Amino acid sequence: PATADPGQLKEFVATELQRVRDRSFGLTTAVLDDDDLTRQHSALMSPLVWDLAHVGNYEELWLLRETAGLEAMRPDIDDLYDAFEHPRSERPSLPLLSPAESSDYVDLVRRKVLDSLETVSFEPAVPLLDAGFVYGMVLQHEHQHDETMLATHQLRRGPQVLPVGEAMPAPRAVTWPAEVLVEAGEFMMGTSTDPWAYDNERPSRAVFLPPYWIDTTPVSVGAYRSFVEDGGYDDARWWSTGGWEWRCRSGKRAPAFWFQEGESWQRRRFGVVEPLPDDEPVQHVCWFEAEAYARWAGRRLPSEAEWEKAASWDPATGTKRRFPWGDQPPSAEYANLGQARFRPSPVGSFPAGASAVGALQLLGDVWEWTASDFTSHPGFCMFPYPEYSEVFFGSDYKVLRGGSWATDPLACRNTFRNWDYPIRRQIFAGFRTARDA
Ligand code: AVJ
Ligand code: FE
């Protein structure tokens, strides 16, 4: 939020609540019939109607019960929409609300939220309300589920219902250096001041890193295709033990949604088949594939500290930026975010979005796998509930940074941490590589 004034903050919250809800309906009831909304398109994903009612239930929990002190509207449905009660694979067989009931439920919750927003006070002394934190949490939650719904759309078979976006012309022919140098030194990692940052991003602390080189842009489809065509998937040398196990068990030979027709490579994207665009960042690769590519290229994945320093640290001034280009909010000139195009932009786009060290496309386009496990950072303090991040800490999940073309500007920043299993390919994830200097 750009303001500390409570009146303006409320106006901002109300506008953003409307904007995210338009987005959610635009991915569900506005484009799909009841059968499509209630079916499970992949065992990895919830039926879309589950996501819709789940965001309403989460909003009710945090904004109506916890914040406004209201009674549960539908105590009978809480269990159905608790992500920890039922794994995704079970969700289609639950007695879920129908699409019409779900949309009525989320509407009713929302009307009560807007009523209570009028009288709520953003008390700095109440951590949930300080700077409207709990509203920011609910807004980001719905945007995160909208991105998950887009991944479900990508897995769905059937005719196209989403805009696929025009192919973008290649960016002006500037030849960027392949990599940029980040000098040795301390930087401030994480944040203690960003009002809507999650617990896992806090607190801000000094981290020393030796010098390293990091790719100027994410790895392109063309570069990744060279790895595929060089027999990369048949050569155990490039793969970690876990990665080779995944490769053999899964039988995968290329990123998800790629296929070959004769000599030419195609991909399927939101129900449309199109030639594989060599100049886009590669997406739909798992962590094991990213790691294998990096080894083949004689490089490695950056740690999340290396990623964050390259994105956020201005060595000239010794200050941290909220976004790679500075503290100004994202716009079309800086980054490809917010499902504006339904695809990544060509590598080398957005020169105005460069970080202080000259790296491009750190925010938007594709999430970037890092070498790091999703662990707590020193000084971590769980807030406001352990199931957002604390229960996922450990060595099961790998950290992704930066946000994709499907991530809303409200739900990303230089310190934001995403995570997933190293075998997952349904998210809009690619990577860039690094090496010691
Ligand atoms: C932060 C994207 C990993 O989707 O599992 C949604 C976000 N948390 N509902 C997820 C989340 C609770 C989370 N990620
Ligand atoms: Fe959720």
Image: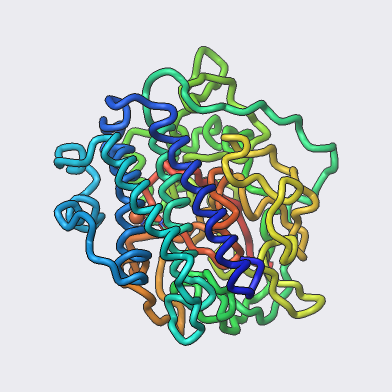
Above or below residue 41? Residue 382 is below
**Which residue lies at the image location 14% right of the left edge and 41% below the top edge?**
95
- The colouring scheme, among rainbow, by chain, secondary structure or one colour, is rainbow
Q: Nearer the viewer, residue 232 or 111?
A: 111
Identity of the residue furthest to the top in this view: 262
Q: Residue 384 in the image: state x and y as whole percent.
A: 37, 74
Above or below residue 119? Residue 26 is above
Left or right of 40: which side holds 194? right
Left or right of 375: which side holds 391? left
Q: Residue 264 in the image: state x and y as whole percent.
A: 57, 17
Q: Where in the image, quadrant-wise, is ligand 1 located?
A: bottom left
**Which residue lies at the image location 80% right of the left edge and 48% below the top edge?**
176
Residue 299 in sight from this viewpoint = no
Left or right of 237: which side holds 225? right
Q: Nearer the viewer, residue 353 or 187?
A: 353
| Quarter of the figure with residue 99 | top left
On the rendered image, what quadrant is the C terminus found in? bottom right
Q: Nearer the viewer, residue 11 or 427?
A: 11
**Which residue lies at the image location 41% right of the left edge and 48% below the top edge?**
145
Q: Residue 173 in the image: state x and y as whole percent.
A: 84, 37
Above or below residue 272? Residue 294 is below
Q: Residue 368 in the image: state x and y as whole percent.
A: 54, 53
Residue 415 in sight from this viewpoint = yes
Above or below residue 235? Residue 113 is below
**Which residue lies at the image location 20% right of the left edge and 43% below the top edge?**
91
Q: How many numbered circles are shown?
A: 0
Q: Nearer the viewer, residue 307 or 231?
A: 307
On the rendered image, what quadrant is the N terminus found in? bottom right
